[in-house]
């Protein structure tokens, strides 16, 4: 029993210290504690676009109606996006114009090549089979080039349509 007495005393001291430590205040000095009820009405706002608030048009406690402007947002990001979309449209228009000019040039070159090939065929009647083959090869090349330019025009138009739809 003599051996247990110091252990019991030590346990009592530790339990007393633990109780005292758990009961001491944990809040910083200078604060006030109290109990009671706080009533408030809170409304969460969710703007349709993101941005930085540059001006608040109401103060706490004001009565507002549905649709009233509560705050103004900085529209820099939206203006930048609009400028970028307009630049994309202008670039797409330029691509369409360039592709159209290439198509016109290819058509003129095709007509000139065809006329030249026909004239050569007439002047070289003895070599008609070889000239005809040459003309078909040239025509195939030019037609392939025209198809390529038409594809470029269609691609540029699609880009223009996409850029216009995003603006």
Image (cartoon, rainbow, N blue to C red):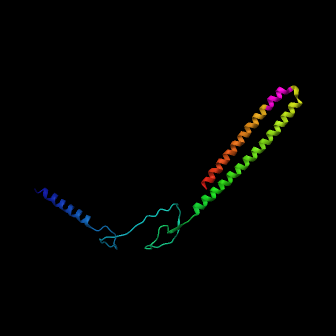
Indicate the position of residue 78 as horizontal and vertical percent values. Answer: 58, 60
Total count of labels = 0
Task: Specify the segment rendered in magenta.
Answer: 127-135
Q: Is residue 5 left or right of residue 111?
A: left
Magenta-span inclusion, residue 132: yes
Q: Nearer the viewer, residue 90 or 25?
A: 90
- Point out the residue furthest to the left here: 1
Q: Is residue 26 left or right of residue 108?
A: left
Indicate the position of residue 11 as horizontal and vertical percent values. Answer: 18, 59
Task: Give the residue displayed 77% in from the left and 45% down from the top.
Answer: 104
Task: Give the residue displayed 78% in from the left and 31% down from the top.
Answer: 136
**Snapshot quadrant of residue 88:** bottom right
Q: Is residue 1 left or right of residue 31?
A: left
Magenta-span inclusion, residue 39: no
Q: Nearer the viewer, residue 20 or 85?
A: 85
Indicate the position of residue 150 as horizontal and vertical percent values. Answer: 71, 42
Task: Give the residue displayed 83% in from the left and 39% down from the top.
Answer: 112
Relative to 44, is 150 above or below? above
Quarter containing the N terminus: bottom left
Quarter containing the C terminus: bottom right
- Point out the residue furthest to the front here: 66
Relative to 75, is 159 above or below? above
Task: Give the residue displayed 75% in from the left and 35% down from the top.
Answer: 141
- Point out the residue furthest to the right here: 123
Q: Is residue 35 left or right of residue 158?
A: left
Q: Nearer the viewer, residue 164 or 20?
A: 164
Q: Main secondary structure of the magenta part?
A: helix
Relative to 7, is 132 above or below? above
């Amino acid at each position: 029993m003599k051996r247990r007495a110091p252990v019991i005393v030590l346990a009592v001291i530790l339990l007393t210290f633990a109780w005292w430590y758990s009961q001491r205040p944990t809040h910083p000095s200078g604060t006030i504690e109290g109990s009671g009820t706080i009533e408030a009405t809170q409304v969460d706002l969710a703007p349709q676009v993101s941005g930085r608030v540059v001006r608040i048009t109401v103060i706490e406690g004001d009565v507002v109606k549905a649709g009233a402007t509560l705050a103004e947002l900085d529209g820099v990001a939206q203006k930048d996006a609009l400028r970028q979309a307009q630049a994309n449209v202008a670039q797409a228009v330029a691509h369409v114009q360039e592709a159209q000019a290439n198509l016109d040039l290819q058509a003129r070159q095709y007509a000139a090549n065809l006329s030249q090939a026909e004239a050569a065929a007439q002047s070289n009647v003895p070599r008609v089979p070889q000239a005809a083959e040459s003309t078909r090869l040239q025509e195939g090349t030019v037609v392939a080039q025209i198809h390529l330019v038409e594809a470029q025009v269609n691609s540029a138009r699609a880009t223009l349509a996409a850029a216009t739809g995003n603006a």
